[in-house]
Amino acid sequence: MLDLLSFHLDHRKADIPPNSNIDRGSIRSALWSGEWADRLSSSRLLENIYLVAVGLRRASFFHPLDEREVLLVRGAAEKVGVGMAVRKAGGRVLKVYLYGEGGEAVTKVPDVDESLGRMEFITAQIALANMTGQLMEYPSCCVSSFVGHLMNGSDQDEKATSSLRSISNPSPDAYFLERFVPCSPNCRNAERMGRQLGSLLTEISPDLGDTYSSLKLEHMEEVRSGRILKEKRERDSLISDGVP
Ligand SMILES: [Zn+2]
Protein backbone atom coordinates (compact mmCIF):
# COMPACT_ATOMS: atom_id res chain seq x y z
CA MET A 1 0.00 0.00 0.00
CA LEU A 2 1.30 3.46 -0.94
CA ASP A 3 1.85 5.76 2.05
CA LEU A 4 1.26 9.49 2.15
CA LEU A 5 4.93 10.46 2.43
CA SER A 6 6.10 8.40 -0.58
CA PHE A 7 3.23 9.82 -2.59
CA HIS A 8 4.07 13.35 -1.50
CA LEU A 9 7.68 12.90 -2.64
CA ASP A 10 6.72 11.41 -6.00
CA HIS A 11 3.10 11.68 -7.12
CA ARG A 12 3.70 9.29 -10.05
CA LYS A 13 4.15 6.47 -7.54
CA ALA A 14 0.34 6.46 -7.32
CA ASP A 15 -0.05 5.39 -10.95
CA ILE A 16 -1.63 1.97 -11.40
CA PRO A 17 -2.62 0.10 -14.60
CA PRO A 18 -6.19 -1.11 -15.17
CA ASN A 19 -6.99 -4.75 -14.53
CA SER A 20 -9.55 -6.38 -16.80
CA ASN A 21 -9.77 -9.60 -14.78
CA ILE A 22 -12.23 -8.14 -12.31
CA ASP A 23 -15.67 -9.67 -11.97
CA ARG A 24 -17.94 -6.86 -13.17
CA GLY A 25 -20.82 -8.13 -11.09
CA SER A 26 -18.96 -7.33 -7.88
CA ILE A 27 -18.01 -3.74 -8.72
CA ARG A 28 -21.09 -2.06 -7.32
CA SER A 29 -21.02 -3.84 -3.98
CA ALA A 30 -17.26 -3.28 -3.68
CA LEU A 31 -17.68 0.49 -4.07
CA TRP A 32 -20.86 1.06 -2.11
CA SER A 33 -20.04 -0.90 0.96
CA GLY A 34 -17.62 -0.31 3.75
CA GLU A 35 -14.89 2.27 3.73
CA TRP A 36 -15.25 3.76 0.22
CA ALA A 37 -18.93 4.56 0.62
CA ASP A 38 -18.24 6.27 3.96
CA ARG A 39 -15.22 8.25 2.91
CA LEU A 40 -15.66 9.16 -0.76
CA SER A 41 -18.30 11.45 -2.29
CA SER A 42 -21.02 10.02 -4.57
CA SER A 43 -19.47 11.92 -7.41
CA ARG A 44 -16.10 10.17 -6.97
CA LEU A 45 -17.73 6.77 -6.57
CA LEU A 46 -20.23 7.00 -9.38
CA GLU A 47 -18.85 9.46 -11.95
CA ASN A 48 -15.13 8.90 -11.55
CA ILE A 49 -14.80 5.24 -10.61
CA TYR A 50 -18.00 3.27 -11.33
CA LEU A 51 -18.69 4.62 -14.83
CA VAL A 52 -15.13 3.74 -15.88
CA ALA A 53 -15.13 0.39 -14.07
CA VAL A 54 -18.23 -0.82 -15.93
CA GLY A 55 -17.07 0.61 -19.26
CA LEU A 56 -19.68 3.39 -19.63
CA ARG A 57 -16.80 5.91 -19.85
CA ARG A 58 -13.26 5.07 -20.91
CA ALA A 59 -11.69 7.70 -18.64
CA SER A 60 -12.51 10.36 -16.03
CA PHE A 61 -10.60 12.93 -14.04
CA PHE A 62 -10.95 15.10 -10.96
CA HIS A 63 -9.18 17.72 -8.88
CA PRO A 64 -8.55 16.09 -5.51
CA LEU A 65 -9.34 17.85 -2.24
CA ASP A 66 -6.07 16.61 -0.76
CA GLU A 67 -3.52 13.82 -1.00
CA ARG A 68 -5.52 11.58 1.32
CA GLU A 69 -8.40 11.62 -1.12
CA VAL A 70 -6.05 10.55 -3.93
CA LEU A 71 -4.92 7.53 -1.92
CA LEU A 72 -8.49 6.58 -1.00
CA VAL A 73 -9.59 6.75 -4.63
CA ARG A 74 -6.52 4.73 -5.57
CA GLY A 75 -7.55 1.95 -3.18
CA ALA A 76 -11.09 1.89 -4.59
CA ALA A 77 -9.87 2.05 -8.21
CA GLU A 78 -7.46 -0.82 -7.67
CA LYS A 79 -10.19 -2.90 -6.08
CA VAL A 80 -12.43 -2.59 -9.14
CA GLY A 81 -9.72 -2.80 -11.81
CA VAL A 82 -9.58 0.88 -12.81
CA GLY A 83 -6.21 2.38 -13.78
CA MET A 84 -4.99 5.66 -12.32
CA ALA A 85 -2.48 8.36 -13.32
CA VAL A 86 -1.71 11.42 -11.18
CA ARG A 87 -0.28 14.52 -12.86
CA LYS A 88 0.78 17.98 -11.76
CA ALA A 89 -1.28 20.77 -13.32
CA GLY A 90 0.40 23.65 -11.48
CA GLY A 91 2.75 24.10 -8.53
CA ARG A 92 0.06 23.17 -6.01
CA VAL A 93 -2.48 21.51 -8.26
CA LEU A 94 -2.83 17.79 -8.93
CA LYS A 95 -5.16 16.14 -11.40
CA VAL A 96 -6.16 12.54 -11.04
CA TYR A 97 -7.05 10.55 -14.17
CA LEU A 98 -8.86 7.23 -13.99
CA TYR A 99 -9.09 4.93 -16.99
CA GLY A 100 -10.07 1.53 -18.24
CA GLU A 101 -9.54 -0.41 -21.45
CA GLY A 102 -8.99 2.04 -24.32
CA GLY A 103 -8.22 4.95 -22.01
CA GLU A 104 -4.46 4.38 -21.68
CA ALA A 105 -3.72 7.66 -23.48
CA VAL A 106 -4.29 9.53 -20.18
CA THR A 107 -0.93 8.21 -18.96
CA LYS A 108 0.67 10.43 -21.64
CA VAL A 109 -0.58 13.60 -19.95
CA PRO A 110 2.58 15.49 -18.91
CA ASP A 111 3.28 17.18 -15.58
CA VAL A 112 3.17 20.95 -15.94
CA ASP A 113 3.68 23.84 -13.55
CA GLU A 114 4.35 27.57 -13.54
CA SER A 115 8.12 27.08 -13.59
CA LEU A 116 7.73 26.67 -17.37
CA GLY A 117 7.28 30.43 -17.59
CA ARG A 118 3.97 32.27 -17.86
CA MET A 119 3.37 32.07 -21.62
CA GLU A 120 4.56 28.48 -21.89
CA PHE A 121 2.35 27.52 -18.94
CA ILE A 122 -0.71 29.05 -20.60
CA THR A 123 0.16 27.35 -23.91
CA ALA A 124 0.54 24.04 -22.08
CA GLN A 125 -2.85 24.56 -20.41
CA ILE A 126 -4.49 25.13 -23.79
CA ALA A 127 -2.91 22.00 -25.25
CA LEU A 128 -3.91 20.01 -22.17
CA ALA A 129 -7.50 21.30 -22.28
CA ASN A 130 -7.81 20.05 -25.88
CA MET A 131 -6.21 16.75 -24.99
CA THR A 132 -8.34 16.22 -21.88
CA GLY A 133 -11.53 17.16 -23.72
CA GLN A 134 -10.82 14.49 -26.29
CA LEU A 135 -9.77 11.84 -23.79
CA MET A 136 -12.89 12.45 -21.71
CA GLU A 137 -15.10 12.44 -24.84
CA TYR A 138 -16.61 15.82 -23.95
CA PRO A 139 -18.75 17.50 -26.63
CA SER A 140 -16.41 19.36 -28.99
CA CYS A 141 -18.47 22.59 -28.78
CA CYS A 142 -17.90 22.66 -25.00
CA VAL A 143 -14.15 21.95 -25.36
CA SER A 144 -13.78 24.73 -27.98
CA SER A 145 -15.61 27.15 -25.73
CA PHE A 146 -13.33 26.31 -22.78
CA VAL A 147 -10.21 26.66 -24.93
CA GLY A 148 -11.52 29.97 -26.30
CA HIS A 149 -11.76 31.32 -22.73
CA LEU A 150 -8.21 30.19 -21.98
CA MET A 151 -6.93 31.90 -25.13
CA ASN A 152 -8.77 35.15 -24.37
CA GLY A 153 -7.85 35.08 -20.72
CA SER A 154 -11.58 35.36 -19.87
CA ASP A 155 -13.19 33.48 -17.02
CA GLN A 156 -15.33 30.57 -18.19
CA ASP A 157 -16.80 29.92 -14.74
CA GLU A 158 -17.92 33.51 -14.35
CA LYS A 159 -19.65 33.38 -17.74
CA ALA A 160 -21.22 29.97 -16.91
CA THR A 161 -22.68 31.32 -13.66
CA SER A 162 -24.13 34.45 -15.23
CA SER A 163 -25.63 32.66 -18.25
CA LEU A 164 -27.18 29.99 -16.02
CA ARG A 165 -28.70 32.67 -13.76
CA SER A 166 -30.19 34.40 -16.78
CA ILE A 167 -32.35 31.52 -18.04
CA SER A 168 -35.55 30.22 -16.48
CA ASN A 169 -35.64 26.50 -17.33
CA PRO A 170 -32.12 25.08 -17.62
CA SER A 171 -31.65 21.32 -17.91
CA PRO A 172 -29.50 19.62 -15.27
CA ASP A 173 -28.60 17.03 -17.96
CA ALA A 174 -26.13 19.51 -19.47
CA TYR A 175 -24.18 19.45 -16.17
CA PHE A 176 -23.49 15.77 -16.61
CA LEU A 177 -20.25 15.54 -14.60
CA GLU A 178 -18.76 17.33 -11.63
CA ARG A 179 -16.87 20.45 -12.75
CA PHE A 180 -17.84 19.94 -16.38
CA VAL A 181 -19.05 23.29 -17.69
CA PRO A 182 -21.19 23.14 -20.85
CA CYS A 183 -20.65 25.81 -23.54
CA SER A 184 -24.16 27.05 -22.71
CA PRO A 185 -26.80 25.99 -20.15
CA ASN A 186 -28.82 24.54 -23.04
CA CYS A 187 -25.99 22.87 -24.97
CA ARG A 188 -27.81 20.04 -26.77
CA ASN A 189 -24.72 17.88 -27.02
CA ALA A 190 -24.02 18.07 -23.30
CA GLU A 191 -27.71 17.47 -22.48
CA ARG A 192 -27.69 14.40 -24.70
CA MET A 193 -24.70 12.96 -22.86
CA GLY A 194 -26.33 13.54 -19.48
CA ARG A 195 -29.55 11.88 -20.62
CA GLN A 196 -27.74 8.93 -22.17
CA LEU A 197 -25.63 8.22 -19.11
CA GLY A 198 -28.74 8.60 -16.95
CA SER A 199 -30.72 6.00 -18.90
CA LEU A 200 -27.81 3.55 -19.05
CA LEU A 201 -27.41 3.78 -15.28
CA THR A 202 -31.15 3.43 -14.70
CA GLU A 203 -31.09 0.27 -16.82
CA ILE A 204 -28.42 -1.16 -14.52
CA SER A 205 -30.29 -0.06 -11.43
CA PRO A 206 -32.98 2.59 -10.73
CA ASP A 207 -31.07 3.53 -7.56
CA LEU A 208 -27.95 4.41 -9.53
CA GLY A 209 -30.10 6.39 -11.97
CA ASP A 210 -31.61 8.36 -9.05
CA THR A 211 -28.21 9.06 -7.50
CA TYR A 212 -26.96 10.29 -10.85
CA SER A 213 -29.99 12.58 -11.33
CA SER A 214 -29.36 14.23 -7.99
CA LEU A 215 -25.67 14.64 -8.80
CA LYS A 216 -26.47 16.46 -12.05
CA LEU A 217 -28.79 18.78 -10.16
CA GLU A 218 -26.04 19.41 -7.59
CA HIS A 219 -23.48 20.20 -10.32
CA MET A 220 -25.86 22.69 -11.88
CA GLU A 221 -26.54 24.35 -8.53
CA GLU A 222 -22.81 24.56 -7.91
CA VAL A 223 -22.36 26.54 -11.10
CA ARG A 224 -25.41 28.71 -10.35
CA SER A 225 -24.27 29.53 -6.82
CA GLY A 226 -20.82 30.56 -8.07
CA ARG A 227 -19.17 28.16 -5.61
CA ILE A 228 -16.45 27.21 -8.10
CA LEU A 229 -15.57 30.89 -8.54
CA LYS A 230 -15.36 31.36 -4.80
CA GLU A 231 -13.06 28.36 -4.40
CA LYS A 232 -10.89 29.51 -7.27
CA ARG A 233 -10.45 32.95 -5.68
CA GLU A 234 -9.55 31.35 -2.38
CA ARG A 235 -6.98 29.13 -4.10
CA ASP A 236 -5.53 32.06 -6.05
CA SER A 237 -5.12 34.10 -2.88
CA LEU A 238 -3.49 31.10 -1.20
CA ILE A 239 -1.04 30.75 -4.08
CA SER A 240 -0.23 34.45 -4.21
CA ASP A 241 0.21 34.49 -0.40
CA GLY A 242 2.82 31.80 -0.83
CA VAL A 243 4.80 33.81 -3.38
CA PRO A 244 7.43 36.05 -1.76
ZN1 LIG B 1 -21.46 22.39 -25.89
Image (cartoon, grey):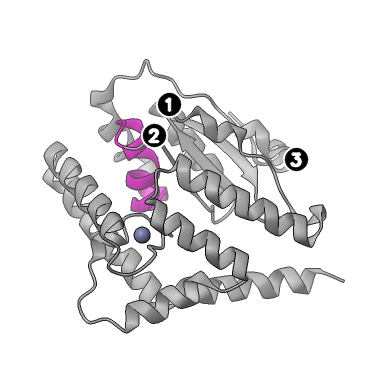
Residue at image mark 1: 102
Give the residue at x 12% y 46%: 206
Dividing the picture into quadrants, the one containing residue 219 is bottom left
Q: In this view, does 222 lie to the left or right of 147?
A: left
Rendered location of residue 212, percent (x, y): 24, 53
Quadrant of the rendering where the C terminus is positioned = bottom right
Q: Is the magenta stretch mostly helix, strand or loop?
A: helix
Q: Which mark is residue 48?
A: none
Q: Mark 2 points at which residue?
A: 58
Q: Where is residue 214 in the image (x, y as percent from the top left)?
A: 23, 60
The amino acid type, in three-letter code, at marker 1 is Gly
Residue denoted by label 3: 9
Q: SS class of the residue under badge 3?
A: helix
Residue at 76%, 60% in the rendered image: 119
In this view, 239 is above or below 131: below
> Does label 2 or label 1 sit earlier along the sequence?
2
Name the quadrant of the N terminus: top right
Q: Position of residue 126 (x, y in %)?
A: 61, 54
Q: Residues within 10 Å of mark 2 (few under 14, many from 20)?
A: many
Label 3 environment density (alpha carbons within 10 Å; few <14, some 14–19, many ≥20): few
| Mark 3: amino acid | Leu
Q: Give the range drawn in magenta.
A: 38-56
Q: Distance between the residues labelled 3 and 1?
A: 29 Å
For marks 3 and 2 on the same chain, the one whose residue lies earlier in the sequence: 3
